[in-house]
Image: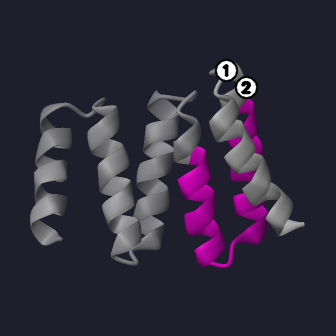
Amino acid sequence: MTDRLEALRTLLAQDPANRLARYGLAMEYGKAGRLEEAVAEYRALISSHPDYAYAYFHAGQALERLGRVEDARQMYASGVEAAVRASDTHARTEIEGALDLLG
């Protein structure tokens, strides 16, 4: 895992706007249980690519795992808006499902 993290960090150092590298880094942090770092990377991704709906979805999941349910709810709601802007009905359905599970 450390090799993947280093490779992704290197890619981002070369191109901070690399959407896939930032998403991959956030996912790797999440897998490693480094949830605060994952959320920070998802937020950076959302900042530069606000219509990338799955960043909101996975950020919301990480926030849930951190016990930050209200933050997760807000992230999912923003994700639904992003999915609508991007005309991504599949992402919208998944994010709405996650939001519904929060009650």
Q: Is residue 26 above or below residue 55?
A: below
Mark 1 to mark 2 CA distance (whole Å): 5 Å
For the rendered model, the colour scheme is one colour
Amino acid bearing label 2: Val
Compared across the picture, whether 56 is left or right of 68 comes to left
Task: Tell me residue 48's x, y (percent).
Answer: 45, 29
SS type, badge 2: helix
Quadrant of the drawing holding the N terminus: bottom left
Q: Is residue 32 magenta?
A: no
User: On the picture, is 74 further left or further right than 79?
Assistant: right
Residue appearing at x 51%, y 47% in the figure: 43
Q: Where is residue 51, by image quadrant?
A: top right
Q: Residue furthest front?
A: 90
Residue 28 location (% of width, % of height): 31, 63
Residue 6 image point, x, y percent: 12, 59
Residue drawn at x 70%, y 61% is 72
Contact, mark 1 vs mark 2 (Cβ under 8 Å)? yes
| Image quadrant where one finds the C terminus | bottom right
Secondary structure predominantly adopted by residues drawn in magenta: helix
Tell me how many marks there are. 2
Q: Which residues are magenta?
A: 56-81
Q: What residue do we see at 41% from left, 52% from top? A: 41
Residue 87: image tag: 1
> Residue tagged by mark 2?
84
The relative height of residue 58 versus residue 53 in the rendered view (above or below) is below
Compared to residue 20, the image places residue 28 above or below, namely: below
Q: Secondary structure at mark 1?
A: loop
Q: What number is the disc on residue 68?
A: none
